Image (cartoon, rainbow, N blue to C red):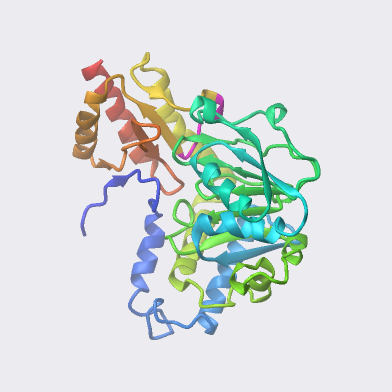
């Protein structure tokens, strides 16, 4: 078997090896079915069992209370940027509040503006999105249709460790890049959505956890594929579902439950992994310059720069020699980004931390 490297890509991202191995075993013929998982009907009893188990796993992991739907949709977070205001804002006569903490929050805002009035409740642009706001800094409309925020900004490496306090206004969260990295108090949210290709599975499926009253509020004149109500009534099967992607979500959530032991343990492991890298950054006496302020640091995406741009190629080459790949940062931040999602083994993070310490000593 070809050797696996440690891939720190921001997405599509590393998946648990046990999930990949089970998918591999069933790729040609599923036991008792006689055909591949890629060939089964979305209306078949086999897929019904798969999607129901995937939903049950998510409900168990997140302790989803009664009164919420768990939907498996398509189009990624980009489509949710539009679906949220289409379903919650359009025609209400209200405005929506947006907390803009980075690149993905910036992308969500104009989609809302196409459907109605959207206000910026806070914007981190002045400091190049290096932190998230305190509750006291949010300028909220108490009568807003909803408040939208991005729990983890993949590019800038900033993250909310707790939910912003928005009172009784529905809280909508783009959790695409840290979904399932810790327990969530779902009852604080109106909607949580996440594209799969970070912590959840392959690209192609988007999970949306949405409160029943917000499902019911979907306008009647929406195209069927853009209506939460229609998709909920069809149990995520209004159209042909992304069968393989949902199947891998089921395998990944099996892994979280059966091998990790739930989200409390996953969160503890994620804090340990991130700590290995932030300790190197903090102990480098300025050699590594972390982008995010310490109180806003992400457990999923560790962003940092080197003291001299000319060292960057040397860093990339040295990392590759140690099977550490996909570390280049986004051009808007520069430097490097280590994406250490749930499935990144602690061995990979430790190897990166060791290399960073060695590189610092050799090049300071």
**Residue 197 shows in this picture:** yes
- Residue 178 point in image, percent of width and height: 52, 46
Please name whichever residue, 188 or 35, is drawn nearer the observer in this view of the structure: 188
**Residue 195 shows in this picture:** no
- Residue 51 point in image, percent of width and height: 55, 71
Please name whichever residue, 195 or 24, is drawn nearer the observer in this view of the structure: 195
Q: 149 above or below 288?
A: below
The residue lying at 35 percent from left, 43 percent from top is 8
What quarter of the picture does the C terminus occupy? top left
**Horizontal side, residue 335 vs residue 143: left or right:** left
**Horizontal side, residue 331 vs residue 96: left or right:** left
Q: 324 above or below 280?
A: below
Q: 108 above or below 65?
A: above
Please name whichever residue, 259 or 269, is drawn nearer the observer in this view of the structure: 269
What quarter of the picture does the N terminus occupy? bottom left
Whether residue 298 appears in magenta in the rendering, the answer is yes
**Horizontal side, residue 292 vs residue 13: left or right:** right
Dominant SS type (magenta): loop
The residue lying at 66 percent from left, 66 percent from top is 228
- Residue 143 point in image, percent of width and height: 81, 45
Q: What span is colored magenta in the figure?
A: 295-300
For the image shown, how many numbered marks are present on the structure?
0
The residue lying at 30 percent from left, 35 percent from top is 351
The residue lying at 55 percent from left, 43 percent from top is 105
Whether residue 113 appears in magenta in the rendering, the answer is no
């Amino acid at each position: 078997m070809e050797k696996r490297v440690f891939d720190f890509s921001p997405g599509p991202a590393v998946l648990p090896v046990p999930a990949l191995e089970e998918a591999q075993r069933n790729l040609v013929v599923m036991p008792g079915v006689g055909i591949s998982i890629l060939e089964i009907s979305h209306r078949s009893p086999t897929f019904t069992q798969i999607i129901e188990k995937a939903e049950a796993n998510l409900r168990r992991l997140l302790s989803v209370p009664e009164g919420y739907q768990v939907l498996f949709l398509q189009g990624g977070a980009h489509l949710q940027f539009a679906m949220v205001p289409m379903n919650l804002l359009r025609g209400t006569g209200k405005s929506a509040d947006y907390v803009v903490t980075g690149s993905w929050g910036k992308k969500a805002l104009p989609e809302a503006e196409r459907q109605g009035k959207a206000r910026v409740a806070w914007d981190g642009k002045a400091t190049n999105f290096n932190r998230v706001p305190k509750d006291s800094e949010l300028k909220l409309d108490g009568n807003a249709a909803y408040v939208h925020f991005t729990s983890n900004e993949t590019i800038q490496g900033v993250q909310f460790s707790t939910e912003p306090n928005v009172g009784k206004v529905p809280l909508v969260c783009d959790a695409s890049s840290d979904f399932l990295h810790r327990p969530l108090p779902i009852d604080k949210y109106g909607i949580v959505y996440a594209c799969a290709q970070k912590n959840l599975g392959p690209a192609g499926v988007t999970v949306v956890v949405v409160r029943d009253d917000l499902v019911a509020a979907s306008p009647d004149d929406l195209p069927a594929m853009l209506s939460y109500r229609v998709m909920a009534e069809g149990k995520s099967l209004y159209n042909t579902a992304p069968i393989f992607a949902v199947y891998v979500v089921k395998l990944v959530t099996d892994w979280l439950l059966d091998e990790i032991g739930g989200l409390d343990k996953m969160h503890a492991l994620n804090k340990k992994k991130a700590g290995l890298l932030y300790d190197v950054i903090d102990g480098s006496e300025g050699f590594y310059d972390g982008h995010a302020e310490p109180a806003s640091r992400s457990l999923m995406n560790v962003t940092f720069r080197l003291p001299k741009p000319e060292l960057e190629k040397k860093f990339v080459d040295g990392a590759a020699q140690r099977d550490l790949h996909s570390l280049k940062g986004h051009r808007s931040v520069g430097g490097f980004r280590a994406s250490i999602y749930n499935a990144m083994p602690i061995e990979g993070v430790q190897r990166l931390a060791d290399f960073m310490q060695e590189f610092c000593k050799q090049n300071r």
